[in-house]
Image (cartoon, helix red, strand yellow):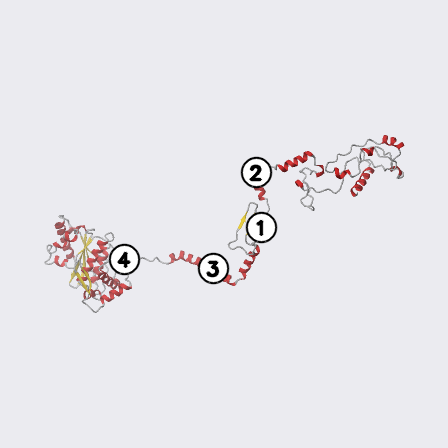
Amino acid sequence: MGALTDSRKRLSADHRHPLPSFPPPSPPPPSKRPKLAPFPSLLNTSSTTQPPPPPPPRVPAGAAASTSSAPGPSSSTTAPSPLPHRRRLPPPPPLRRPIHGPQRVLRAFGLGPARPHAAPSWPSPSSPPPTPPGSLGLEQYVELVNRVSHPAPPPPACTTDVARESEPAPLEVVAVEEDGEERKGEEKEEEGWASVVVRKVPLYRELYEASRRKRDARLRTLEFEVRLAEEGRLGLEKLAEVLPRITPKKEEVPEPFVPLTDEDGDVVRHALHGRNRRERLAVHEASNIVITREILQCLNDKDWLNDEVINLYLDLLKERELREPSKFLKCHFFNTFFYKKLSSGGYDYKAVRRWTTKRKLGYSLIECDKIFVPIHKEVHWCLAVINIRDKKFQYLDSLGSMDMKVLRILARYLVDEVKDKNGQQIDALSWKQEGVKNLPLQENGWDCGMFMLKYIDFYSRDMDLIFGQKHMRYFRRRTAKEILNLRAE
């Protein structure tokens, strides 16, 4: 009834306002009586003055039910009512107006709002005016059905990327176990295509753990220790970079100066200071030399070296060369009796002719690099060197003296030896004869023999004479160890 009353009021209001496009209405009646249906006699006069009514408006099918019950203009309204007691309705308005009545909200196909109380969406100026559900015709309905049944193809990839960039930030969904226990292990996040991040650890758990770490004194102590250790490690790394620049490089100890071990020191001490002086400490079968404690004790401090110790040590040097030929020069070591035999009566080559046969030595003297000849002068040991490689004769005396007679005898011997053993004639007398300069000299009256052995040792290594008086005590114990082991190092 509200809808009908509202419509009747609006229709009567539209009738009262004249429009210029239509003929002016008849003057208002003096009373309410003319509003009633006129008498039949007056119908002809009114029909002549009123224009023909316009055709009824087309009402959609969906609104037919709602508007059928409302009174409106029809064909019967144009015809005069034959009954005098019926009221005549006003003529229809010149413009069709929609009836504002309660309408059913259509949510199908997106034609109505998503929620009953949703705010109305204002259409943009460029978009076409929305089609009310009541005015949806057959063509529009078919088009709507086709649009729903066959959706438009997806936009290209570039458009999709732009749309994804404009999407809102991914939502955070917290997953909690049903039993209330959090999953052990590290926090893991999984991101799907829909930009939804699933957190395996609840947020309140993370906040609780962070707060607990701040309040735990033990954790603070451990963090401090870790930080301190890290700083210490960084400091050590920097120190390792700086240390080589402020620390001098430690040179390796040359082979002739390798210190004795504690065990070797005990063995040498027992061999030199034992009570049984006739005890056999070493026997060299190749040279048939037997070393007793009495013979070995010449290596104690302030004692002169004897022939047995010197000759055995020279034999050990020759064995060392044969054992490691690439490390040492090819040398020949005469014993302490050679020069005495050679120089007996002034010069006697026949006395030593059979000492150097190739059957005994396995080589000829001319094939050697250096030949060492110990020289004993009653109470003093010296050394003469036949340097075949450099073609010269050298004389080494730890007291700094020089003996040219020894060098002339050795030059004569070399000429006879090469002629006898090799059948060659060499001019050894024209070789240079010299005393070695800058020799390490002894500073006492008993180390001449030790100096002579070290001259031979260093020259056989092809090394400079880089030792002195301060090394003699060490060399004595090292020589004793090598004789006890029957192995020169």
Alpha carbon distance from label 1 to label 3? 34 Å
Q: Amino acid at mark 2?
A: Pro
Q: Label 2's element?
A: loop
Alpha carbon distance from label 4 to label 1? 75 Å
Among numbered discs 1 and 3, the one appearing first in the sequence: 1
Among numbered discs 4 and 3, the one appearing first in the sequence: 3
Among numbered discs 2 and 4, the one appearing first in the sequence: 2
| Residue at the disc numbered 4 | 255
Q: Which mark is residue 172?
A: 1
Q: Is residue 445 visible?
A: no
In the picture, which quadrant includes the C terminus?
bottom left
Q: Amino acid at mark 4?
A: Glu
Alpha carbon distance from label 2 to label 1? 29 Å
Q: Residue at x 21, y 58 (%)?
A: 316
Q: Position of residue 136 (x, y in %)?
A: 70, 36
Q: Residues within 10 Å of mark 1 (few under 14, many from 20)?
A: few
Among numbered discs 3 and 2, the one appearing first in the sequence: 2
Q: Residues within 10 Å of mark 3 (few under 14, many from 20)?
A: few
Q: Position of residue 129 (x, y in %)?
A: 69, 38
| Residue at the disc numbered 2 | 156
Residue 253, above or below 33: below
Location of residue 472 by image quarter: bottom left
Q: Residues within 10 Å of mark 4 (few under 14, many from 20)?
A: few
Alpha carbon distance from label 4 to label 3? 47 Å
Foreground residue among 322 and 8: 8
Among numbered discs 2 and 1, the one appearing first in the sequence: 2
